Amino acid sequence: MTKPVSNEARMRGRQFYFNPGPTNIPDSVLAAMHRPAEDFLTDAFKAVLRRTHANLKHALGTRQHLLLFGANGHSAWEAALANLFSRGDKILMLESGYFSYHWTKMATELGLEVETLWADWRKGVPAAAVTERLAEDKAHAIKGVLVVHNETATGLVHPLAELRAAIDAAKHPALFLVDTISSFASMEFRFDELGVDVAVGGSQKGLMMITGLSFTAISQRAMEIAQSGGGLRRSFFDWRAMMTVEPQRFPGTSPVHLIHGLDEALRLLLEEGMDNVVARHGRFADAARAAIRHWGDGAASDARISWDSVEGEIDGIQILCTDPDRLSDSVTAVFVPDGHDANAMRQIALDRYNLSLGQGLGPLAGRAFRIGHLGDMNEPMMLGALATIELALKASGIPHKSGGVDAAIAALSA
């Protein structure tokens, strides 16, 4: 008797990977890392590191400081907190969803006092609320304003230029720290022009790399604070020690293969042009949103989301973010109607069709799924993913209006 073949063994072709990170990795980036061990003290490797530094600073739009860490994006969070703030310092976190909550949790565990500026996860914090709160802080007890630029859990973007203006309007000296992990190399970001003090990011999203590298762009003002001798205890994450060699030193062994991969990824991005990269992501986001709106056939609700719950009814497929000016161009979070299981649909998409989608996080578990439309992507990939999502919606019995792919094609043809 023939042994049954597993579903995994029947899969053919590459998995369609539409999680919002990690993302698809270009073949040339994989090839750049496929090399023997290399002495990281040679002039040849140092030249690669200098070029990678220069190209990343160019892509970030900064002439100030930059450091790379051989660790994921959470490490850049911790490094920023440890180098800039002292135990008991107060910081203001702008709530946006799951990742703003976890940055808050990290800061609290490090001994900082965190005040959260509350927001409905579907809308984000209004810039005016930032000005109002900082204006109340006459003693300037708040040392930093922290924001997740693009909240991966909710598909919501905070407008950084408006937030910078809000801080300035309050005439407040707080540092401006921005998590760009899921926005950089997908949406417009110019560090120096925006007046950001610290931007943290990771290699595995818009940078089209494997997980394992993070970066921190640092303003001159922030670097002077870090070098003044304050801050929390740190060793591996000490910016001062890392700045002793040009362009930087790594604590211990340099992540040679990751640097080669990032070097190639940056070459591809800069060859395309960062403005073109941003425009491409905008087109694919428009296509995804057109399909979702078609599936939902105009469904909408005033349900609100907080860390604890979803309050209100969801009576049809709909985009989670309700502010049209704050829609993410790298990920879209999608509500499914009440009484239906988004995770069951995702499992069908994965098991039957080899399409990987992001799950709902926190209170959105089972209530929503996420489509990552960032990184190395083209029109056939985007349309193929949307067609397969519609197939999985049908197979899972989630009510929807068929023909979402036609709506996406219309958006891409506009």
Image: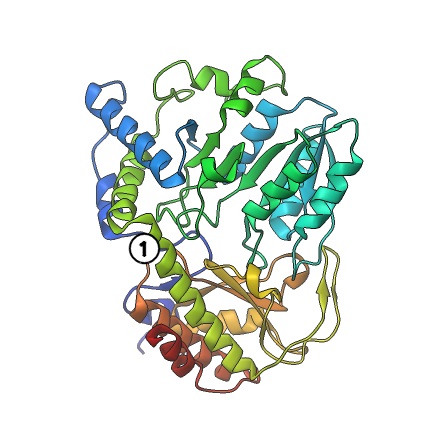
Q: Would residue 240 appear left or right of 105 to someone viewing this image? A: left
Vertical comparison of 117 with 346: above or below = above
**Looking at the image, which is closer to me, 365 or 322?**
322
Can you give x and y, in whole percent of width and height, for residue 352 in the image? Answer: 41, 75
Residue at x 29%, y 49% (from the top left corner):
273
Vertical comparison of 160 with 137: above or below = below
Can you give x and y, in whole percent of width and height, for residue 180 in the image? Answer: 50, 44
**Residue 396 appears in view:** no
Quarter where residue 211 is shown: top left
Q: Identity of the amino acid at label 1?
A: Asn
Residue at x 72%, y 70% (from the top left corner):
303
**Looking at the image, which is closer to me, 321 or 236?**
321
Q: Assign the N terminus to one quadrant of the image.
A: bottom left
Residue at x 31%, y 36% (from the top left corner):
55
Q: Would residue 214 appear left or right of 316 to someone viewing this image? A: left
Residue where numbered disc 1 is placed:
276
Vertical comparison of 153 with 86: above or below = below
Residue at x 58%, y 56% (from the top left corner):
153
Describe the element under mark 1 as helix, strand or loop: helix
Can you give x and y, in whole percent of width and height, for residue 331 in the image? Answer: 49, 60
Q: Would residue 396 appear left or right of 271 to someone viewing this image? A: right
**Looking at the image, which is closer to me, 36 or 154?**
154
Q: Would residue 181 appear left or right of 298 to someone viewing this image? A: left
Vertical comparison of 135 with 331: above or below = above
